[in-house]
Amino acid sequence: MKKVIVVLEDNADRVSVMKEWLADCLSMYESFFSDDPNEVIDVLQKRSQSILALSLDHDLFERADGDLDRTGMEVVDYLSRGEPSFPILIHSSNQIEADRMKRRLAKHHWTVSRVTPFLDTSWIGTDWYPTLRKAIGRLAKKESKADVDKDVEE
């Protein structure tokens, strides 16, 4: 099964630019975008072995259904009950809640990075994509080292 990058984001402009970056630079992977925490959790459950990375927004105020109670914290709550297996990038301008998300995930030993959106979507190319790429690279090195260690043990 092809590896997948999962993104929780409600802003259509951000989604469009993020998809462009992933298509241009990481086209060897699938991507899944949603503004619904439940859909993201469903993908995380069904494709747990193929998740390459997860990017989370906190505030989801631009959802089509207008539900202001849904947030990225729902996904964090779900992840806090499981074993860390992929890097997480928090991309939220809500400083307080983004820090809270990061602390909760770190407490449960998840690898977490954070970027703060600015100037419409320009931050996606300057901050989000490079941070995501580094997180994926660190995961690849970690998996490669684990494979070498496994070979040595056998």
Image (tube, rainbow, N blue to C red):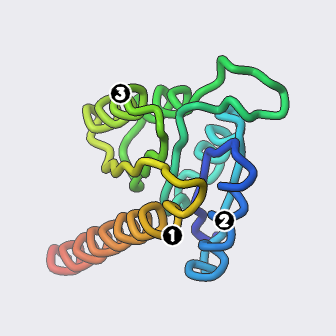
Q: Of callouts 2 and 3, which one flags the residue occurring earlier in the amino acid sequence?
A: 2
Disc 2 target residue? 17
Question: Identity of the amino acid at label 2?
Answer: Val
Q: Residue at x 37, y 49 (%)?
A: 114
In front: 20, or 143?
20
Q: Mark 1 touching mark 2, by CB under 8 A?
A: yes
Question: Identity of the amino acid at label 3?
Answer: Arg
Crowding at mark 1 (Cα within 10 Å: few <14, some 14-19, many 20+):
some
Where is residue 140 drawn, in percent x and y?
Answer: 35, 73
Where is residue 138 drawn, in percent x and y?
Answer: 30, 69
User: Which mark is drawn over residue 100?
Assistant: 3
Disc 1 target residue? 125
Q: Residue at x 34, y 51 (%)?
A: 113
Q: Is residue 135 left or right of residue 31?
A: left
Quote the CA–CA distance across marks 2 and 3.
26 Å
Disc 1 is placed on an element classified as helix
